Amino acid sequence: MGEAGAGAGAPGGPEASPEAEVVKLLPFLAPGARADLQAAAVRHVLALTGSGPGRALLAGQEALLQALVELAPASPPARDAARALVNLAADPALHETLLAADPGLPARLLGRALDPQWPWAEEAAAALANLSREPGPCAELMAALAAAEPADSGLERLVRALCTPGYNARAPLHYLAPLLSNLSQRPAARAFLLDPDRGGVVGTLRNCCFEHRHHEWLLGPEVDILPFLLLPLAGPEDFSEEEMERLPVDLQYLPPDKQREPDADIRKMLVEAIMLLTATAPGRQQVRDQGAYLILRELHSWEPEPDVRAACEKLIQVLIGDEPEPGMENLLEVQVPEDVEQQLQQLDCQEQEQLEREQERELELAPEPWVERATPT
């Protein structure tokens, strides 16, 4: 993220040096200061972050940095304080100075970004995204993440916040995605994200697919996300030449020992991510054009887990069904009437019950396994 806008601040006295100005601001940033004076002081700090010399002056002030982070969230100046930190972190030349002045800054910003009640969590995440672009500060942030309890590591909390729609009802958290991308510079972060027992990568991708405005870019040649989502769902199927030509190159002529993703939860997240990409008419067309139906058709035939198979079936119906009526093309924005939603839930329950009855019947009709018995002597 670049610099946040810096408003005009109250100028200091003509004889005051820049360092003296900063020292004089500190009492007005204290928790008990008058609200109007506190707001004026923060506006002045924000104005200073609009220039290189101003940022260099502020970056070495530990007390001031702490005061900016710790301003009460409900106070009017808190947002300007958060934006000032975004601007300071946007200058790579100041990262070393920032961390030297306040080694605890990454941990405090992380706490704000992951606090579901913090109204300026987006600004805290943006500051971290700026700060973590360089290897040194990125390593410092990883140390702060690792300092959390092992049972609930900072990286796990970060991924959970990113993958939970509405995690913070008071602030969007879009900048957690570039923050996570920056953290992947570190081997420990890559090992965490690629841990097959966590599904962190898939969860992150699925969360990003909620942003339907970016579907064309995600599905286009610059990112080309669909083959990455489909490949774990593909098996060793032998398609006809005509069908093979409809598939992306990465999905053609897969080896006969190709295995599908063994984790059912990850398979479901992959299907859900593709479903999100079909929310708009252009997205549905792009998914159809890349032969997704062929992979999903074979997955549906193979899938042993009922909930994953049901999700796969719904996605197939979207791909082969008629286009929605005008005004309802964006499936993420369509409001389903409550009575219709209840009917759909009832049908899902009936379908699940029918499936369970069929499975029980198959078990009853299955022949008793033959067991070799010893011959009595």
Image: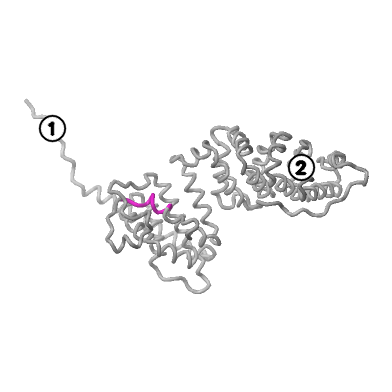
The residue nearer to you, when weighing 5 against 348, is 5
Residue hosting label 1: 373
Q: Is residue 129 left or right of residue 271?
A: right
Q: Amino acid at mark 1?
A: Arg
Q: Which residues are magenta?
A: 228-235
| Above or below: residue 196 compared with residue 4 | above
Number of marks drawn: 2
Question: Which secondary structure dominates the residues rendered in magenta?
Answer: helix
- Please state the horizontal and vertical placement of residue 229, each as a whole percent of the image: 43, 53
Q: Position of residue 259 (x, y in %)?
A: 33, 46
Drawn side of residue 158 relative to residue 325, left or right: right
Q: Residue at x 28, y 58 (%)?
A: 239
Which residue in the structure is indicated by mark 2? 56
Q: Amino acid at mark 2?
A: Ala
- 98 drawn magenta: no
Q: Nearer the viewer, residue 93 or 365?
A: 93
Q: Which residue sits at x=27%, y=55%?
A: 238
The residue most toward the left is 377
